[in-house]
Amino acid sequence: MSLARILPILVGISSACAFGVFAAPTRADDGAPVDLAPLFRPPPAFTGALAGLRSPLLFGDGRRVTNAFEWSERRREIRGAWDALLGSWPALVPSPRLEIVASEHRESFTQHRVRVQVAAEQVLDGYLLVPDGTGPFPAVFVPYYEPETSIGLRGEHRDFALQLTRRGFVSLAVGSPGGDARLPDRAGAVCQPLAYLGFIAANCHTALAARDDVDPRRIGIVGHSYGGKWALFGSCLDDRYACAAWCDPGIVFDETRGSVNYQEPWYLGLEAGRTRQPGLVTPDNPRTGAYAELVARGHDLHELHALMAPRPFLVSGGSEDPPARWAALNHTVAVNELLGAHERVAMANRPAHPPTPESNAQIVAFFTRFLGEPPTDVVAVAHRGLLRDAPENTLPGFRACLDAHLGFEFDVRRSRDGALVCIHDDTLDRTTDGTGPVSATSLDELRSLDAGGWFAPAFVGTRVPTVDEIMALIAAHPAADGLYAVDIKADDPDMERDLVALAGRHGVLDRLLFIGRAIDHPDVRRRLRGADAGCHVAALASRREDLPAAVAAADADWVYVRFVPTPDETAAIRAAGRRTIVAGAAVAGPAEDPWREAVAAEVAAVLTDHPIALRRVAAVTRRSSPAAPPGSAP
């Protein structure tokens, strides 16, 4: 997806208009627009409630997470602990087959009966619904007992695939592997059945993302009851899902509720040589399998919820997920607050388990907001990564940015033997234990250096990364909605060509913005655009009087300003088809007033040393601006 999709407000059009089906606010059956805002706020009785659950912001050894880098480490600890108990997934299918068996046109979309490969030797029957038009469209994966319900051919109010396709989403619906939810066919996998359903969801994401009519960065997942449990595990265990809706699955372990039955062997209670009777846990019918270990060790599903942060999710609660479940959701709210993210955890409630027209309208509105409508947030671009919490220009800092859905800037130089490496200075002395020019050092020599010990003992052994590694890392996080600024440091006429080729191989060129020497060297911009006309390149305006020349600069589609522009100035930049990134001392931070001015001016991005604080200020600034009509884009 191009940066014009990420930041469409800045080119004067919105993707909601490009996909006309998203232009009108989602409405309930009574015709009233759906107002999502109240769903992000717990009722007063549950504000701050935590249900006695252990905070996911505590490491296993009791240390508290205090910053985004530490959260990146903690989320890996959580995932590792759950994988150890649930069993690891088999190898994902690199290119799952999606075979169209038959097709027919319905309403404003085409319904394909399909067979989708979900494991090396396993395929599932299902349906693929594709809206009329050219796309690429956002997409949803919709699991349930069987796929016909999801596409509206049977049952009532569980037709999420049909409803979302009517709103412009590609939908893939499948049913239980093996055809019986209580006897799931795990195709030889040794993990717990519910973990295996997450594995299937991951392969279905890959199948959807490979389609030309699907935007791979706007894929969500939704399911009801059994399908809700499947969607919960699918989204929490696969960072590629951009958002999720879980419809009354039972979002925590609750042994008082017969339908919140994670103890069953077809979910998490599978144990070789031992089978419990279906039903509630009792002394005569005890816990088994991974579920027994999870409970004994004090784990609960709120830990998996936290892995979603800062990706948004909606709990469409019924009888199994009443408002009291906010006491679990508040833990993920706390993680999002640490990351500076606002309105990422939502909950709606109804009295009974079955979905209703109202709850379905809320689900459609939720996906429309987060996948179908344009984001309007200023993108925080972390200067050299999270340089206050991790060594600058290193993979740990960049990985933490991606986990937090922050953009980042990285510097590029070339080693003696021609490798593109990431380091700011032209010498090694400040940020490694080596000395001398970077350009006089081979890649092997660079890789032997310690690039983290200078920052803190915990980072001893951190290496100077290659640009190839950085681009591979960005490619592995398709749902991370950041801007990645490439600061070209060296005067090297071949560097632009090599950078563009490398970005193309990793499929991340449209997520990059080239700065550094590009901003004030027309020949560098020309070489970048000559290598690929789709490159995003910035031209410099150091002062206000430089703006006309920067806006008119050839081979550039961004303006890199070293002052905070006024709303009129950014409007003029947008009118010229350009976007604005603000950098320099004024916005490096932590002074908040320039950030508020930048947000008010609707700049596209801010390059700063304090990206979390910037995102937090941006959220407050947006909330204090005049309210939009209910159901409109946030």
Image (cartoon, rainbow, N blue to C red):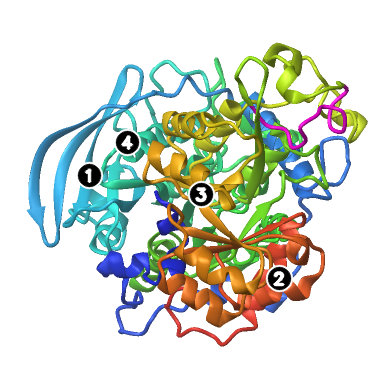
- Provide the residue designation for mark 2: 595
| Relative height, residue 250 to residue 267 (above, below) | below
Q: CA distance from mark 4 to mark 1?
A: 14 Å
Amino acid type, mark 3: Pro
Residue 495: give x, y in percent of width and height.
Answer: 54, 31
Q: Nearer the viewer, mark 2 or mark 3?
A: 3
Q: Is residue 432 magenta?
A: yes
Q: Secondary structure at mark 4?
A: loop
In terms of sequence position, does the residue under pointer 1 or pointer 3 come before the other? Answer: 1
Q: Nearer the viewer, mark 2 or mark 4?
A: 2
- Provide the residue designation for mark 3: 522
Q: Secondary structure at mark 1?
A: strand
Amino acid type, mark 1: Leu
> Would you identify the image quadrant in which residue 568 lies?
bottom right
CB atoms of marks 4 and 1 within 8 Å: no
Q: How many marks?
A: 4
| The magenta segment | 421-433
